[in-house]
């Protein structure tokens, strides 16, 4: 009997109160949305759910659905590390809108999940494959971020990648 999958995000381990970690990683069953214990194991997830790790889920392992995605937005943070604090915002319900909130805070009010760090690359590639999304604009933004980092933190860039012009999407393929 096939299990009913209703969540676009499953985690190995549970969020605790106020999204603080409450480790239950020895349990073979996954938590829907990081909160609700299911009878689903990672082996039960169909193709299109991919494994990731992100600071947005307290660095625990998660599995995200990459089919059925309607829109993705990428936000680059210009700071002293390359992609750790960059985010992708994902919507399964429609286009993501940009908004200015109280105190001039910018954001996206209508996303379903956000992921930060190096997991953005495999998620973007899988979204392109399983949802048919055109991610060419996001690839341009990532190229701009890489070039900015290379110019402003050249010593760190060279230490990590040498003097090569790295294509991160090729690395993750």
Image (cartoon, rainbow, N blue to C red):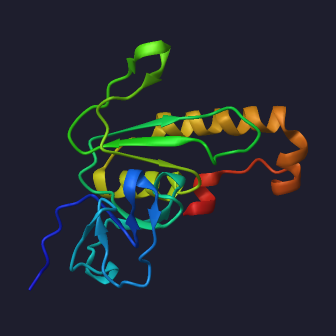
Between residues 12 and 74, which one lies in front from this camera angle? 12
| 30 sits to left or right of 79 | left
Q: Residue furthest right?
A: 155
Residue 131: image location, x then y, percent:
29, 52
Q: Position of residue 113 (x, y in %)?
A: 35, 47
Q: Is residue 25 left or right of residue 119?
A: left
Left or right of residue 10: residue 82: right
Q: From what the image shows, is residue 62 above or below residue 3?
A: above
Q: Quadrant of the C terminus?
A: bottom right
Q: Residue furthest front?
A: 17
Please count the marks in the image: 0
Q: Quadrant where the N terminus lies?
A: bottom left
Image position, residue 167 (x, y; %)? 66, 51
Residue shown at 39% from the left, 61% from the top: 15
Q: From this view, report whether residue 78 is shown above or below residue 168.
A: above
Q: Is residue 142 left or right of residue 100?
A: right
Q: Is residue 149 above or below residue 27?
A: above
Could you say where residue 86 lies in the image, as x and y percent from the top left? Answer: 57, 41
67 vs 102, nearest the viewer = 102
Residue placed at 27% from the left, 31% from the top?
A: 95
Location of residue 147 by image quarter: top right
């Amino acid at each position: 009997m096939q299990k009913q999958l209703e969540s676009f995000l499953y985690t190995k381990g549970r969020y605790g109160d106020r999204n603080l970690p409450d480790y239950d990683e020895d349990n073979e069953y996954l938590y829907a949305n990081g909160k609700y214990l299911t009878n689903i194991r990672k082996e039960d997830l169909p193709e299109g759910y991919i494994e990731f790790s992100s600071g947005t889920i307290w660095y625990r392992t998660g599995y995200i659905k990459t089919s059925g995605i309607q829109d993705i937005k990428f936000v680059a943070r210009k700071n002293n590390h390359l992609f750790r604090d960059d985010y992708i915002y994902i919507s399964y319900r429609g286009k993501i809108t940009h908004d200015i909130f109280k105190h001039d805070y910018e954001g996206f009010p209508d996303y379903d999940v956000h992921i930060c760090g190096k997991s953005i690359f495999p998620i973007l590639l899988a979204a392109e494959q399983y949802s048919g999304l055109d991610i060419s604009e996001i690839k341009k933004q990532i190229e701009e971020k890489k070039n900015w980092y290379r110019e402003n933190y050249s010593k760190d860039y060279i230490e990590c990648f040498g003097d090569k012009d790295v294509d991160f999407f090729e690395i993750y393929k």
